[in-house]
Amino acid sequence: MPISQNIYKSTVRIESDTPNGGSVGTGFWFLFPIHENSVVPLLVTNKHVVRNAKQTRIRLNVSSESDSSLRFFDVNIEQGESAFLMHPDASVDICVFVAAPLFSQMEAQGINPNLFFFSERNLRSDQFITPIEEVHMTGYPNGLWDMVNNRPITRRGITASSVLEDWQGRPEFLIDMACFGGSSGSPVYILNSGMYQVEDGIAAGERFILLGLLYAGPTVNVNGNIEIINVPTATSAVVKTTLGMNLGMVIKAEKLIDFKPLLGL
């Protein structure tokens, strides 16, 4: 089945209870293959999505052979922020939740998760890309989602800086796309179906590359100065004193590799 028919299964809406109220962000599923029949499944998001969270909630689309009416499985991560493994570099806004125990629990109950996983094999590696690429982002802008079907929103834009270079010397790049609150942690990826450019011409088929995850965006404050701020997660109304620039800052997906030693891989 084409990836385009499954990509909407790759994310979850992360709701957190914090001392300041509630927050909403995006997480996506990712796995490290160990060998042919073994993987390490992870839920990836930004550190600031779960920061100070007392507990966190996600909802999965599922099926069950014993209960054909079962569509969703609600997970309450009672440990909140402490349940997530933080990237060892404080300046890299990524954390992961190790999902293997959760899936084992679901399997014991006869519940099958209906999910799509990005994989280490989907990282850019030596695949040919150009400085300007069409990209997609899947998530929950302003917390918006199809609550009846538990589905995210997918949007399209282009790279605003070259993925081949590190923006301002950091493992990041910019995308030209409106990045609203709730989009923090959204996966940014290339998904071409049909014809696409390769180094020596044009190829036909499907190209799928995980480029990174959204974490921040430049804004213009009331004085006209440009600031970089984390994409907000708070669900409460605030007085807006800045204007977005319809740009997003994306951490390169290769930084996920840094978790392998922490996971014993």
Image (tube, grey):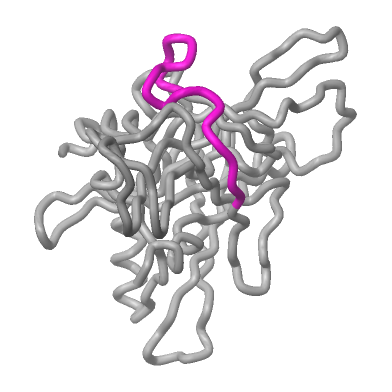
> Does residue 179 sit above or below 29 in this rendering?
above
> Measured from the top left, where is residue 184 in percent x and y?
58, 38
> Measured from the top left, where is residue 226 in percent x and y?
72, 12
> Does residue 83 sit above or below 175 in this rendering?
below
Q: Nearer the viewer, residue 64 or 226?
A: 226
What's the residue at 82%, 22% (across, down)? 242
Residue furthest out toward the left: 35
Query: Residue 165 sits in which quadrant?
Result: top left
Query: Residue 177 sits in which quadrant?
Result: top right
**Is 259 inside the magenta-drawn segment?**
no
> Measured from the top left, where is residue 32 in percent x and y?
23, 47
What's the residue at 20%, 54% (across, down)? 39
Left or right: 185 in relation to 230: left
What's the residue at 66%, 39% (across, down)? 18
Q: Which residues are magenta?
A: 155-172
> Measured from the top left, where is residue 145 in percent x and y?
67, 60
Name the quarter where the N terminus is drawn.
bottom left
Query: Residue 128 sits in which quadrant?
Result: top left
What's the residue at 55%, 37% (across, down)? 158
